[in-house]
Amino acid sequence: MTSDRIAAQITFLTAADALKGVTRANVLMDGSRHENTAEHSWHLALWAMVMADQAPGVDLHAAISMALLHDLVEVDAGDHPIHLPQDASAIATKEKAAADRLYGLLPSDQGQAFRAIWEDFETGTSATAQCIRRLDMTQPLFQALNNVAQTQVDHDVLRAILTTGRSTALADTWPPIYAHAMGLLDKTPAPLPAPLDDRIRFLAEADRLKSTLRATRLCDNSRPENSGEHSWHIALYALTLAEHAAHPIQIDRVVQMLLIHDLVEIDAGDVPIHSAAARDEATQARIEQAAADRIFGLLPADQASSFRALWDEFEAAQSPDATFAKSIDRVQPLISNLETGGTSWRDYNVTRAQVETRVGVKVQRGAPAVWAAVAPRIDAWFAAYT
């Protein structure tokens, strides 16, 4: 049954929320805190989207899907910093058990498909896996090199990684990036050739999205979610629930929309859907348009135009792709509320009717079967707590 299938998919997506609680060795570029694996996975997927032409012949959607899924096993197995001694065999055993559990939550056909993507990344033999592995060593490297609070210990670790560790491979596979990284390390950065210079500037700016807080809380209710990890989660939601779209969609475009849809919040901040500020749509639209001008304008002209067009399409919510993307953007916070006892519903005194008009209408436009599957849980919550 469709409802049973959706229930299994929602169970998987709820379990995936725990990736936001897995702390990595990397620190955000502003030095404020350690990064978590969910926001790293979002940033890696964005790197893939921006650097697609650096790996000719690699399918972009396959690469982005791999970036979204590659570290999911860390929900159970944890992160293992590359600069510390590790028992590779023990880690592999833990990660296999994690894959068994997490992908086993999905309907069997989808679980097998997602697991195959993860296994491809682990073996590293396909062109897609080699592409994502290269980006997976580059994104954390540049984040660490640009950390404004970098210590001498951090500097020494980075030098070891670049001169004797895994990042030495970049000297052969991506020479301009390697030369620039060494220059950043020595405070004499070599100029990057166009268009890499603008792309790196854009990707560095994107790091700030990890510090934009939302009203939605993590499913364990431990803290507010940020917009970077939210963007990872809804891209995974779209990938998982694509079969339930109301109309035929191009899931690759939907996922890309969701990876960039909230970048404007770097300047504009998050406006909770149930807040009073959300009612002033005209003012917020002007702020977000200005933010889009600035942030997408950091990219080379051709990418600035294509990324901005994709964001504009999402905002207009008229195409089948954008309609589905908007519906998914409403579903994930809804599940968070159900998992946390209606946290933001309580904070904003939301009624069942308001959930219907502010959330349900949009979800039903793009994914009616998903709304039908979750509506009984919403009814039960409001019946019990209001």
Image: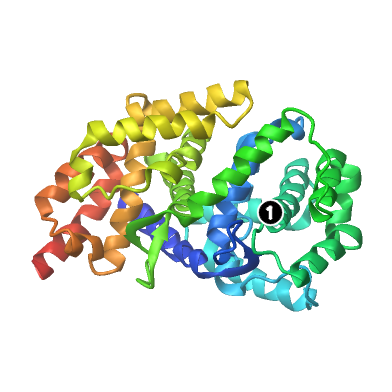
Q: How crowded is mark 1: few (under 14 residues within 10 Å), some or many (20 or more)?
A: some
Within the image, what quadrant is residue 192 found in? Answer: top right
Residue placed farthest to the front in the image? 187
Residue 91, picture quadrant: bottom right
**Can residue 246 be seen in this snapshot?**
no
Q: Give the quarter of the figure containing the C terminus.
A: bottom left
Residue occupying the point 41% across, 30% down? 290
Q: Where is residue 350 shown, x and y percent of the image?
A: 14, 56
Q: Where is residue 245 in the image (x, y as percent from the top left)?
A: 37, 36
Q: What residue is drawn where x is 54% and y is 22%?
A: 305
Task: Give the image location of residue 360, x and y in percent.
Answer: 21, 44
Looking at the image, residue 255 sits to the left or right of residue 118; the answer is left
Judge left or right: residue 131 versus residue 160.
Answer: left
Does residue 134 appear in the picture of this structure?
yes
Say which residue appears at 20% left-offset and 50% top-offset: 274
State the residue in front, 366 or 227: 227
Answer with left or right where residue 207 lies relative to residue 319: right
Circle 1 — which element? Answer: loop
To which residue does mark 1 refer?
A: 146
Name which residue lies at 11% across and 70% down: 384
Q: In this view, does 201 lie above or below 297?
A: below
Coloring applied to the structure: rainbow
In the picture, residue 92 is in which quadrant? Answer: bottom right
Residue 164 vs residue 13: left or right?
right
Image coordinates of residue 181 in percent, x first then y, are: 80, 49
